[in-house]
């Protein structure tokens, strides 16, 4: 009997000790109320966590998204803030989309102030989805300034793309699109960059931008052509070299494109076509020219007797 009483006492003590924990677990279902309390006490990070827990547990009130977005914004978690305002706006309704856009503009401005590229990119993508007419607008230059010198990465691409969409005039838009193409090139995505540069060259809305875009287009096309040729794809290489030759003209890069075309024709067994392209590469230049020297080496190899190895 004494042992039974001892067991009952121990169980009672255990229940008393675990009572607060059990209560805590029981009240966790009302994360929204806990979040509201944390927000009121300026514990915005905790509020964001609680609101998201409420959402994860099936909280169906759309205002939860708006609350979570506001908490994320005040906590400085701008990616989370943008995600929540996006979800709030996508949920439906013109009024809700307008409110979400207001929140996303605040997130974008906060990201610009803090130099938060990830937060800015997330906010701009969300704006494009929920309220395309509100994308960037007047703060496009400030958004681009967040990127700094020689930007790279997907976030930079997102920011530049939406900055261009909100540019106040065609010249600024082309300048931003040139920067977009340059980020692609730095990321090793030359094929995508060529498409951007080509569109800028064709539009000719800003002569300075068109000229530098042409130079970078030719540089990218040369790289792609040489890469294709080195990987045993002469037909693909020929297309890139022809583009580089067309846009490069009589510049050094344009002449290098003709050199590449000569290599392609030689690889395909078209000796006469190779000689023609090589001659175009050295046209108007003397022996002291570096490209002229490369052409001479190749022509000398072609002129060797068949018994001798001849592969430029």
Image: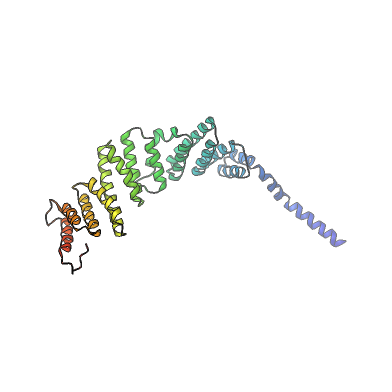
User: Is 261 located above or below residue 168 in the figure?
Assistant: below
Q: Quadrant of the N terminus?
A: bottom right
The residue depicted at 42 percent of the width and 35 percent of the height is: 136
Most extreme residue toward the bottom is 307
Closest to the observer: 141 or 236?
A: 236
The residue depicted at 17 percent of the width and 52 percent of the height is: 280
Q: Taking 248 as reference, is 5 left or right?
A: right
Closest to the observer: 34 or 6?
A: 34
Closest to the observer: 157 or 5?
A: 157
Most extreme residue toward the left is 286
Q: Is residue 209 visible?
A: no
Q: Taking 52 as reference, is 289 left or right?
A: left
What percent of the width, then of the height, locates residue 170? 32, 34
User: Is 275 located above or below residue 97 in the figure?
Assistant: below
Q: Is residue 133 visible?
A: yes
What percent of the width, then of the height, locates residue 27? 68, 44
Q: Taking 216 as reference, is 137 left or right?
A: right
What percent of the width, then of the height, locates residue 188? 35, 52
The residue depicted at 79 percent of the width and 56 percent of the height is: 11
**What is the image's colouring?**
rainbow
Q: Taking 65 as reference, is 280 left or right?
A: left
Closest to the observer: 5 or 294?
A: 294
Most extreme residue toward the top is 95
Q: Quadrant of the C terminus?
A: bottom left
What number of labels is visible? 0
What percent of the width, then of the height, locates residue 299? 16, 60
């Amino acid at each position: 009997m004494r042992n039974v009483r001892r067991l009952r006492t121990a169980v009672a003590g255990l229940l008393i000790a675990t009572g607060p924990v059990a209560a805590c677990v029981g009240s966790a279902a009302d994360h929204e109320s806990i979040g509201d309390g944390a927000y009121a006490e300026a514990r915005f990070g905790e509020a964001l966590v609680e609101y998201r827990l409420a959402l994860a547990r099936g909280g169906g009130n759309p205002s939860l998204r708006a609350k979570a977005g506001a908490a994320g914004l005040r906590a400085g978690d701008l990616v989370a803030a943008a995600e929540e305002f996006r979800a709030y706006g996508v949920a439906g309704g013109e009024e809700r989309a307008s409110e979400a856009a207001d929140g996303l503009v605040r997130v974008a401005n906060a990201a610009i102030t803090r130099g938060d590229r990830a937060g800015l990119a997330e906010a701009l993508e969300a704006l494009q989805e929920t309220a395309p007419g509100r994308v960037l607008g007047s703060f496009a230059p400030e958004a681009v300034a967040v990127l700094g010198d020689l930007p790279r990465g997907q976030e930079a691409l997102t920011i530049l793309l939406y900055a261009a969409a909100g540019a106040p005039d065609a010249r600024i838009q082309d300048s931003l699109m040139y920067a977009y193409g340059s980020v692609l090139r730095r990321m090793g995505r030359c094929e995508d960059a060529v498409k951007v540069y080509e569109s800028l060259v064709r539009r000719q809305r800003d002569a300075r931008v068109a000229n530098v875009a042409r130079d970078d287009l030719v540089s990218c096309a040369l790289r792609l052509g040489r890469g294709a040729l080195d990987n045993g794809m002469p037909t693909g290489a020929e297309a890139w070299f022809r583009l580089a030759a067309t846009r490069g003209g009589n510049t050094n890069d344009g002449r290098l494109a003709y050199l590449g075309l000569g290599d392609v024709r030689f690889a395909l067994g078209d000796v006469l076509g190779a000689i023609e392209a090589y001659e175009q590469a050295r046209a108007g230049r003397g022996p002291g020219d570096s490209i002229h020297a490369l052409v001479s080496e190749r022509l000398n190899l072609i002129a060797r007797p068949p018994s001798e190895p001849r592969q430029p």
